[in-house]
Amino acid sequence: MANCVTCGDELHPERAEKYDHCTKPECVDRNDKGLPMVAIGVNKAADQYVVLNERTQQEMEKGRYKRRPEVPGSVRTPSGTRPARTPKPAPPQTPRSSDGASRRRWSPAQENLAIIYRAMWMNPDQIAEKLGVSRYLVTQILLDATARGKR
């Protein structure tokens, strides 16, 4: 049976697998060592922290956490050495049952108003009442606009 290195008390077998000290506050204070951490800049608002272990150290050496420019065209390359571009694969084609299924049942003006009302924190019921359409149609308008990247 293992004993605590600080006070000599007997350790629980599961605790002894990872630690050589008991859980008394004075033993923990004396023997616990903090984990080495490293801050990785994510954006202007916050940092991401990771434990600095062997794997993280290797990833840092390979440049995984290296800051990359936000705009691809902002980095100038020396003349005559352009990076090779690989063509992007075409997105998979999804079969459509008919052209009527892809046709929208609302006008661009209705879509714009629905987006504006959503930005004003109105729920679909309120938007439907304002536009004079069903709640279902408002939901479809907003889902379609979100899928196409409109806010």
Image: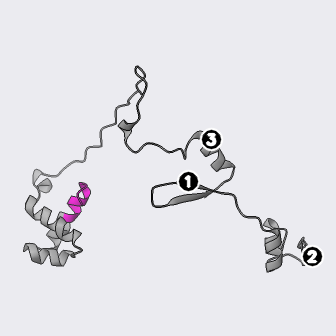
Which of the labelled discs sits on residue 103, or is there none?
none
Who's the residue at 11% across and 58% down the image? 104
- Residue at the spot of label 3: 61
Identify residue type, mark 3.
Glu
Between residue 137 and residue 69, name the one nearer to us: 69
Who's the residue at 21% across and 59% down the image? 145
Which of discs 1 and 2 lies nearer the camera? The answer is 1
Tell me where residue 63 sits by quadrant: top right
Which of the two discs, 3 and 1, labels the residue nearer the N terminus?
A: 1
| Residue 119 horizontal side relative to residue 15, left or right | left
Q: Residues within 10 Å of mark 1 (few under 14, many from 20)?
A: some
- Residue at the spot of label 2: 8
Residue 144 part of the magenta-drawn span = yes
| Residue 44 horizontal side relative to residue 18, left or right | left
Q: Is residue 133 visible?
A: no
Depicted 49 relative to depicted 122: above or below: above
Identify residue type, mark 1.
Ile
Q: CA distance from mark 2 to mark 3?
A: 42 Å
Magenta residues (range): 142-151
Q: Residue 106 in the image: x percent, y percent?
A: 9, 62
Q: CA distance from mark 3 to mark 1?
A: 14 Å
- Residue at the spot of label 1: 40
| Residue 135 horizontal side relative to residue 4, left or right | left
Under circle 1, the secondary element is strand
Q: Residue 53 in the image: x percent, y percent?
A: 68, 53
Q: Residue 133 in the image: x percent, y percent?
A: 9, 72
Under circle 3, the secondary element is helix
